[in-house]
């Protein structure tokens, strides 16, 4: 089967969902990885021909291996987009272990999915797109653990890029600022609905990413920093 497949983690809502919509519009087959059972079932009923959902925890190594093995039977994996992640915005003394574990799931999933996809592709002909945050570029108030996670993701991204320099494996880091999604719904003491309304549209951010990672020019955009005006 020669269909080209895009894997997107965390695609049940927000930026991930916008990416799914735009890749399907470009006739790619999209495999979506998310743990939100209800939202994933809705997507199964919405997208039938160019879509396959996998429900599970991105930090579960057995789930990741099983998902990649099943995706291999669907076609040629062209792009892996590591998008899944959860925030925890608190003052430094308010963090609990569960906040730390929640934030670090995104980093764990990024590493697990990248590793298994590289193995499946025999370390060639693959684009890995790691969507992080502008929090990976600077420290922010009330984001100590979130920034620590994103800085870790940035370190992993740059190390991966160095490892595969000069090969057909391309690694792209994406650093968006605030996006107007439900990402902040549990952090209203930090990001109010009024402030969130000034953030970037997820459709605009998704288009910027899609346009850059699917271009046919003989070059690779290494880093994409997207800031709101």
Image (cartoon, rainbow, N blue to C red):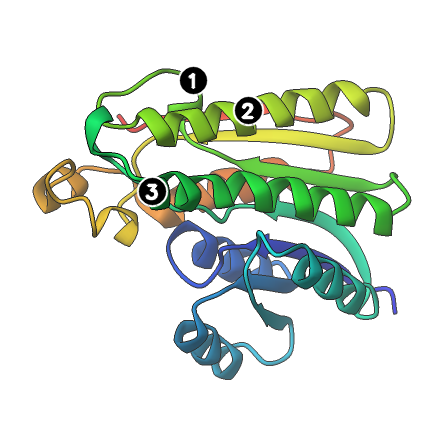
Q: Which residue is mark 3?
A: 99
Mark 2, other Cα within 10 Å: few <14 / some 14–19 / many ≥20: many
What residue is shown at x 62% (from left), y 38% (from top)? 129
What residue is shown at x 10% (from left), y 40% (from top)? 189
Q: Nearer the viewer, mark 1 or mark 3?
A: 3
For marks 1 and 3, give the CA distance.
21 Å
Quadrant the N terminus occupies:
bottom right
Q: Please tell me whether mark 3 sits on a helix, a strand or a loop.
A: helix
Q: Are marks 1 and 2 in contact (CB under 8 Å)?
A: yes
The reply to whether residue 222 is visible in this rendering is: no
In the drawing, does residue 133 fall left or right of residue 185?
right
Q: Quadrant of residue 96?
A: top left
Residue 226 in picture, x, y percent from top left: 41, 28
Where is 80 relative to 169, above or below? Answer: below
Of 124 and 189, which appears nearest the observer?
Answer: 189
Where is 65 relative to 111, above or below? Answer: below
What residue is shown at x 60% (from left), y 69% (from top)? 54
What residue is shown at x 87% (from left), y 39% (from top)? 123
The reply to whether residue 57 is visible in this rendering is: yes
Query: Which mark is on residue 154?
Result: 2
């Amino acid at each position: 089967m020669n269909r080209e497949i895009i894997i997107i983690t965390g695609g049940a809502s927000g930026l991930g969902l916008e990416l799914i919509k735009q890749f399907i519009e470009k006739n790619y087959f999209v495999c979506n990885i998310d743990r939100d059972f209800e939202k994933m079932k809705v997507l199964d009923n919405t997208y039938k021909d160019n879509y396959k959902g996998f429900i599970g925890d991105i930090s579960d190594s057995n789930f990741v291996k099983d998902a990649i093995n099943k995706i291999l039977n669907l076609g040629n994996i062209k792009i892996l987009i590591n998008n899944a992640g959860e925030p925890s915005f608190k003052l430094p003394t308010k963090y609990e272990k569960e906040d730390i574990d929640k934030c670090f799931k995104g980093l764990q999933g990024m590493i697990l999915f990248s590793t298994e996809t590289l193995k499946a592709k025999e370390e060639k002909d693959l684009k890995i797109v790691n969507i992080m945050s502008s929090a990976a570029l600077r420290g922010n108030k009330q984001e100590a653990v979130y920034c620590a996670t994103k800085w870790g993701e940035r370190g992993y991204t740059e190390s991966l890029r160095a490892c595969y320099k000069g090969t057909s494996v391309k690694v792209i880091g994406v650093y968006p600022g605030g996006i107007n999604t439900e990402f902040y719904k549990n952090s209203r003491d930090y990001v109010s609905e009024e402030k969130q309304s000034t953030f970037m549209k997820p459709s605009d951010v998704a288009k910027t990413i899609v346009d850059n990672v699917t271009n046919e020019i003989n070059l690779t955009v290494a880093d994409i920093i997207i800031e709101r005006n």
